[in-house]
Amino acid sequence: MEDSPRNLLDTNSLSETENAILQLCKWIRLVSVAGFSIGAIVVVAMLMNGSDILHQFAETLPYKIKGLYGILVAVFFVVFFITALLLYSLHRAVTFIIQGLQQKNNVMIGQGFGFLKKFFITLAVIGVVQFLFNLSNLF
Amino acid sequence: MNEFPEQENNDDLEKSREILPVAKIAGVAAIISILGTIAGILVLIVSPSSDVVVQQEGLDEAAAQVAKTTPYISAFMSAIIGGISFYCLYRFSVFAKKAGKTGDHTPLVAGLKSLAGYFRLWAVLLFVVISFLGMAFIGGILSSLFN
């Protein structure tokens, strides 16, 4: 017979590890919600005044090269979609882990941590790019 | 608490197996990100770009002072954030690996708490960003109303 989903608000029914995972999920969910909110604000700002914002930003940069505006637009879209990918990974991770905890299903918890792994892989790749960029400025 | 402690331990052991690959990648990401932060600070110390901007723009003394100090303040902030992020992720990585080896759930819980600390830091930072964006948005609306 299939068990009914557990009430995760009743922390007495959870083990110490499950409690720690639940606390972790709360913070991850908060990060993803805050991130999506910032994304929505950025989209609205760009739709209203995106061209002016990027032109003003291009003027403040110390490098003055031909086609800088186009490069900035491309960089904006790349950063925007990578951030969206990161936030999506976090959102999926939390959804799977919480469902797994509710249903006492370790496979679902594993899938959730798989999304968290993808998040950290993307973070590591971004770290490598940042490191190489800083090294190229150093030498 | 669970009525069957043995089953609880097995469950925790299975969870630590799921968490172990995440911990390994998180440890690598922590080391790479702290290296990137250190390289960024070195770039600022070795070749500060603010002097060039100040000379090019021909700013007055107060604005020039702000332009000179802003990169150092932002570098200081990113060093603090990078340091705390590294500490949390590295602790998570070390404790989760230890839990994977020993099969003990206590280090796993400590590691998960460190990982929660990492996401707590980012949640606070994102809410600070949201409040700044909100203020800028309200400021923009007010300035367009009064002009």
Image (spheres, coloured by chain):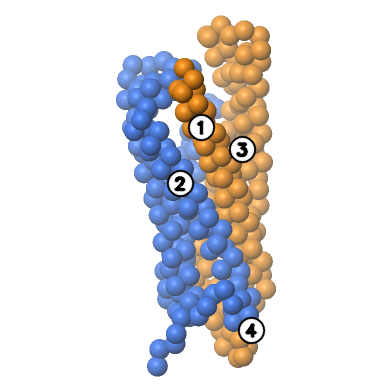
Q: Name the secondary structure under disc 2.
A: helix
Question: For the N terminus of chain A, which image quadrant?
Answer: bottom left
What shade does chain A have? Answer: blue
3D distance between C-alphas at marks 1 and 3: 27 Å
Q: Name the residue type under label 3.
A: Ser
Dot 4 falls on which chain? B
3D distance between C-alphas at marks 4 and 3: 41 Å
On screen, B144 above or below A5? Answer: above
Q: Name the residue type under label 4.
A: Met
Q: Report x, y in % for residue A52.
A: 38, 22
Q: How would you rate the neighbour count of disc 2 (Cα within 10 Å): few for under 14, some for 14-19, many for 20 or more? A: some
Dot 1 falls on which chain? B
What shade does chain B have? Answer: orange
**Depth order, front residue of A84/A37:** A37
Q: Name the secondary structure under disc 4.
A: loop
Q: Report x, y in % for residue A33.
A: 48, 53
Q: Report x, y in % for residue B22.
A: 50, 62
Q: Name the secondary structure under disc 1.
A: helix
Answer yes or no: do the residues labelled 4 and 3 have beta carbons within 8 Å? Answer: no
